[in-house]
Every structure is written in C-alpha cells, then in structure tokens.
Amino acid sequence: MATQPNPPSPGNGGAPPLVELRDIVKRFGSVIALSGVTMKVHAGEVMCLLGDNGAGKSTLIKTLSGVHQPTEGEILIDGSPVAMRSPRDALDRGIATVYQDLAMIPLMSITRNFFMGREPGRGRGPFGSFDVGEANRVAKDEMAKIGIDVRDPSQAVGTLSGGERQCVAIARAVYFGARVLILDEPTSALGVKQASVVLRYVAQARARGLGVIFITHNVHHAYPVGDAFTILNRGRTYGTFPKDEVSREKVLNMMAGGKELDELSAELEEFARSDAASGVRAGAAEHAIAEGLHEEAESLHRH
C-alpha cells in the first residue's frame, strides 16, 4: 500500500511541516506493529488518523510522543530530524498528547489538574508556595477562551462532563506551549452534545495555528473537522487524502475493509456449499450470513 503525499495545508506559506514521519517502522520482537508509515502535519491543519482496533494507531501515537523509539525511519520537527527518547523530549519540542484517560485526578480541583507538575509559585526555595489565586485566574480564563464558563475553578474536575474534561486537558496542553496536539480518541466515550464541544475546540485549535493529529475510528466525528485523512490498516497506510478528494463514504470503505468483507463472504459461501453437500442443515444459515456480508460489501463499493 504505497503512501500518498500529504496535501498542502492552506496558509502554510511553503513552511516545512510542524512534524513529519518518514517510513516509520516499529517492531516488537518478531511482531511488526508499524510498517513504512509516512505522515505530515502542518500548522493550522487537522490530520485525522483513522483505523479500526489493532490498526496501529496507539503504537504510532506512542512513537510520535517519545514513549517508543522507531525501529526504522525518522521523525522531523520543522524539517529537521530529531531523536525523541522520552515523552519529556516530545513536550520540550511542542508535541503534547491528550490520552483517552486524560491523566486527571477526579477528586482534585480543575486548577490543580490544569497545573499538575507545573504549579505557579510565590517566593523561592523552601519558602515558596503555590499561588492559588493566580492559578485559579489562569485556569478560569483559559477555559473561558474555549467557551466553557467555570464559575469555581476550585471545584473537583470530576464534576465536569466528559467533554469538558477533555477540553481542560486540551487547554492545558495549549497553555503550556503545545504546537502539535495529539488527541487519542477524544470523543469515543462521549455523547453527541459532549462530542460537539470537543470538536468545536479542535476547530479552534486549528484556527490558532496549531497542528492537530486527531486519532479516532469514528469517521462521522473526524470528517467535519478534518483537513486530511491518513488511513491505517494493520500497521500500514492506505495513504493520506485531502478532504476535497475523498468522500466520507470512501474513507469508511477503506476503514471497514470492503475487500475483507468480500473474502469473508466467499469463505462462508464455500462453507455453505460444503455443508450442503454433506447434508448439514447449518448450510442455509451460513448462506444467509454470506449474502448479508456480500450486500454490505457491495454497498461500500458503490460509494
């Protein structure tokens, strides 16, 4: 599956991508988790990384965020090759990852979660203290920028909705200097209304000139905000496609694997014929399943 070049990002002025992956390979012993993955993300662009479970999305995230080092290939930041040995290296280079579990403590306040590990202080040395007033003000202001009115930033973060907690994590990453946001399935456990809150902020992050890598298996969430789509399947890429050259249905077809449905339908038909020849009654049921899969594959191919 040869990769295709990323589309040019509107307004990037010919600048190099914020981050670029070239022919990334990641092996765990004899298991090949990623094989020749190439992808670029420019400033002011939302790159949607799509794939079903087991496609390699999580491994790619961890490779890009410094958790894993690639076995082969290279990572470039602003056009220069870099070696990221840890998540701290990635953060120092402006790459922030917001994981599905958000790395938040529900019983701690919004402010404490916002500044966890980076608390603003007053005074120096052993006489320094956490400047709660300043921290509360910043947390409240940053949340207001994304349209969430926090009346009391000292309230427990667990009292917020799932979408609002996602936005706290995103706002925190942006405030601390992220240039590239990696969002790991940010809408997977959210309802329609909460997901729309997160998608709205993804669009705002793009408008502010950030590069966003939006990882999901939900095409219906990715398509409205995405500028380009990289499709992963079993550690390989089908390519990167600009939004104006690929329909929602085509993206869904590549993710769903129309070819795999055809092959499974053929196998079930063969089982049905074999069972019928042996007088096994289950053949009719297998034939019906095969017909259903064939119709679904045909529907995907039509689009």
Image (cartoon, rainbow, N blue to C red):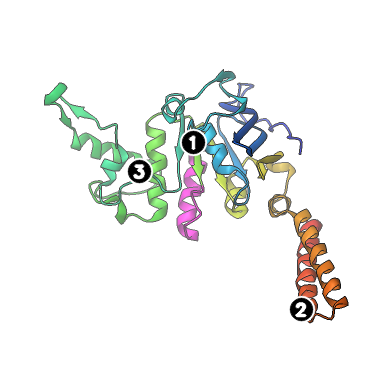
Q: Quick check: can you spot residue 176?
A: yes
In the drawing, does residue 45 fall left or right of residue 253? Answer: left
Q: Residue at x 38, y 51 (%)?
A: 164
As measured in the structure, the alpha-carbon distance from the residue carrying label 3 to the one carrying label 2 is: 59 Å
Q: Amino acid at mark 3?
A: Met
Whole-percent x, y for residue 96 in the image? 45, 34
Q: Which residue is mark 3?
A: 143
From the image, give the main secondary structure of the stretch colored magenta.
Answer: helix
- 172 versus 250 height, above or below: above
Question: Do the CB atoms of the residues marked 1 and 3 lie less than 8 Å apart?
Answer: no
In the drawing, does residue 302 fall left or right of residue 254? Answer: right
- 252 versus 286 height, above or below: above
| Of pointers 3 and 2, the one earlier in the residue sequence | 3
Labelled disc at residue 282: 2
Q: Residue at x 30, y 56 (%)?
A: 159
Q: Amino acid at mark 2?
A: Ala
Q: Amino acid at mark 1?
A: Leu
Tag 2: Cα neighbours inside 10 Å, few (<14), some, or many (≥20)?
A: few
Along the line of sight, the residue nearer the viewer: 292 or 34: 34
Q: Which residues are magenta?
A: 185-207
Whole-percent x, y for residue 88 in the image? 41, 28
- Considering the numbered disc 3 on the image, is that residue within a helix, a strand or a loop? helix
Along the line of sight, the residue nearer the viewer: 161 or 97: 97
As measured in the structure, the alpha-carbon distance from the residue carrying label 1 to the one carrying label 3 is: 17 Å
Q: Residue at x 81, y 69 (%)?
A: 271
Labelled disc at residue 181: 1
